[in-house]
Image: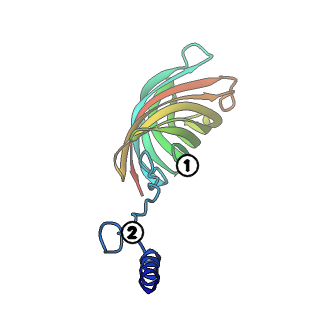
């Protein structure tokens, strides 16, 4: 009977031991899988910019013989904020011109204060713009008006963009006259971004 008790005790002792399968080393920890970092799909347009623009202006009016066309160009400055794929911004332009509208009356400069909003398309920004415009003509002085338009800017590097823009301007009852003047401009723009 002592042999049966010893055998039973030995069997119970074996059953109480942990069962190890395979390697006697501790298992390697499971790798931690983290969610992938979200990266922007395009460049970051946030920041100030300044540069130049040059192009062509076509000026018309509601009076026969008061019109003209020619070169226009000047300085641009502004700030854009990038919301991901949508960009909002504000800026100011000052263009110089020497466009004869009628003998003794030349369009000399145009000031614009603008808002713009657009969507990123690859490394580019397709946008709509509009705002306040002021034109200055010799002998007639200056007149307030508005402008609307669209454009496309493309980032060559993180700090330099080129683009093109078309704008429509309207100035009603220019100066002391009842002449309504409208102008369309096509310009190429280059800007340093910082």
Instruction: Tell me, yes or no, if residue 171 can be seen here.
Output: yes
Q: What is the number of the mark on residue 158?
A: none
Whole-angstrom CA distance, mark 1 to mark 2, is 41 Å
Closest to the observer: 52 or 31? 31
Query: Where residue 23 sits: x, y (%)?
Result: 29, 70
Judged from this view, the residue extending furthest toward the top is 64
Residue ID at (31%, 74%): 24
Mark 1 or 2, closer to the camera: 2
Query: Where residue 4 sits: x, y (%)?
Result: 44, 80
Taking the image as shown, residue 190 lies to the left or right of residue 138, namely: left
Residue ID at (45%, 49%): 40
Q: Quadrant of the C terminus?
A: bottom left
Rendered image quadrant of residue 15 = bottom left
Q: Could you say whether the residue bearing mark 1 is in a helix, strand or loop?
A: loop
Judged from this view, the residue extending furthest toward the front is 1
Query: Where residue 104 sits: x, y (%)?
Result: 51, 28
The residue at which mark 2 appears reads as 29
Q: Are marks 1 and 2 in contact (CB under 8 Å)?
A: no
Q: Could you say whether the residue bearing mark 2 is in a helix, strand or loop?
A: loop
Query: Where residue 11 sits: x, y (%)?
Result: 43, 76
For marks 1 and 2, the one nearer the N-term is 2
Q: Residues within 10 Å of mark 1 (few under 14, many from 20)?
A: few
The residue at which mark 1 appears reads as 83
Residue 106 vertical position relative to residue 2 in the rendered view, above or below: above
Residue 84 vertical position relative to residue 73 in the rendered view, above or below: below
Closest to the observer: 171 or 12? 12
Q: Residues within 10 Å of mark 2 (few under 14, many from 20)?
A: few
């Amino acid at each position: 009977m002592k042999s049966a008790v010893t055998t039973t005790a030995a069997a119970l002792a074996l059953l109480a031991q942990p069962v190890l399968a395979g390697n006697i080393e501790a298992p390697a920890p499971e790798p931690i899988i983290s969610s992938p970092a979200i990266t922007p799909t395009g460049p970051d347009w946030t920041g100030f910019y300044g540069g130049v623009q040059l192009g062509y202006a076509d000026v018309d009016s509601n009076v026969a013989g008061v019109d003209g066309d020619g070169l226009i160009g000047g300085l641009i400055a502004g700030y854009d904020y990038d919301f991901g794929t949508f960009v909002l911004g504000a800026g100011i332009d000052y263009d110089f011109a020497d466009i004869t509208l009628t003998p003794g009356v030349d369009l000399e400069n145009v000031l614009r204060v603008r808002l713009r909003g657009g969507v990123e398309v690859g490394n580019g920004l397709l946008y709509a713009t509009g705002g306040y415009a002021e034109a200055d003509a010799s002998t007639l002085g200056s007149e307030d008006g508005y402008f609307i338009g669209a454009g496309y800017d493309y980032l060559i590097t993180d700090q330099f963009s080129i683009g093109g823009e078309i704008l429509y301007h309207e100035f009603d009852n220019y100066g002391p006259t009842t002449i309504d003047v409208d102008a369309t401009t096509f310009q190429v723009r280059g800007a340093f971004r910082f």
